[in-house]
Amino acid sequence: MHEMALSRGIVEVIREQAAAGGFAAVRTVRLQVGALSHVEPDAILFCFDAVSRGTVAEGARLEIERPPGRAFCLPCGRTVPLGERYDACPDCGGHELVLVGGEELRVKELEVE
Ligand SMILES: [Zn+2]
């Protein structure tokens, strides 16, 4: 399960930061999960709860941001919104697009105590 591995990764990041930063507990974890990342936020919440037990991340609240898909269209010369990874440009209908947003999978911020 993709989300399980991802949740383990998140807990690992928190453990490393706790070791480096010397905090004992995490209150809130802000995650970015891009709309094009094929990761289910609900599944992450569920998995994180399970894998964080007994770690410094236990009891932390997950806040998940969903950055929308965005791509730079070469013919249009600007950034356009993208609903799906292989969608055409909504303005010119072309496919000369460079994905610039929506694939994020990262811990953006930790609120610690
Ligand atoms: Zn375009």
Image (cartoon, rainbow, N blue to C red):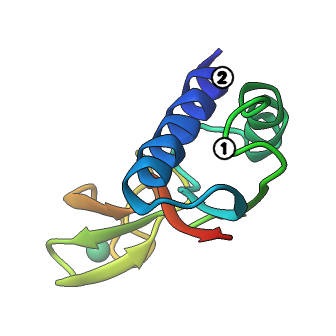
- Which quarter shows the N terminus? top right
Q: How many marks?
A: 2
Which three-letter amino acid code belongs to the residue tagged 1?
Answer: Val
Q: CA distance from mark 2 to mark 1?
A: 18 Å
Where does label 1 land, which residue? 56
Q: Is residue 44 above or below residue 67?
A: above
x and y, in percent, of residue 20 in the image: 37, 54
Q: Earlier in the sequence, mark 2 or mark 1?
A: 2
Q: Residues within 10 Å of mark 2 (few under 14, many from 20)?
A: some
* Residue at the image point whose x is 72% and y is 39% from the top: 40
Please tell me the numbered disc located at residue 67.
Answer: none
Question: Which quadrant holds residue 104?
Answer: bottom left
Task: Provide the secondary structure element on which disc 1 rests.
Answer: loop
Residue at 85%, 34% in the rendered image: 46
Q: Cβ–Cβ below 8 Å for labels 2 and 1?
A: no
Q: Amino acid at mark 2?
A: Met
Residue 103 seen in render? no
| Residue found at x 63% / y 38% | 39
**Residue 4, numbered circle:** 2
Residue at point 62%, 33% (across, down): 7
Q: Which of these two is toward me, 72 or 39?
A: 39
Q: Is residue 1 above or below residue 20?
A: above
Instruction: Give the position of the C terminus as an image quadrant.
Output: bottom right
Residue 97 lies, in percent from the top left, at 24, 60
Q: Circle 1: is it few (<14), some (14-19), or many (20+) Cα within 10 Å? A: some
> Is any atom of residue 109 visible in this view?
yes
- Mark 1 residue CB less than 8 A from any atom of ligand 1: no
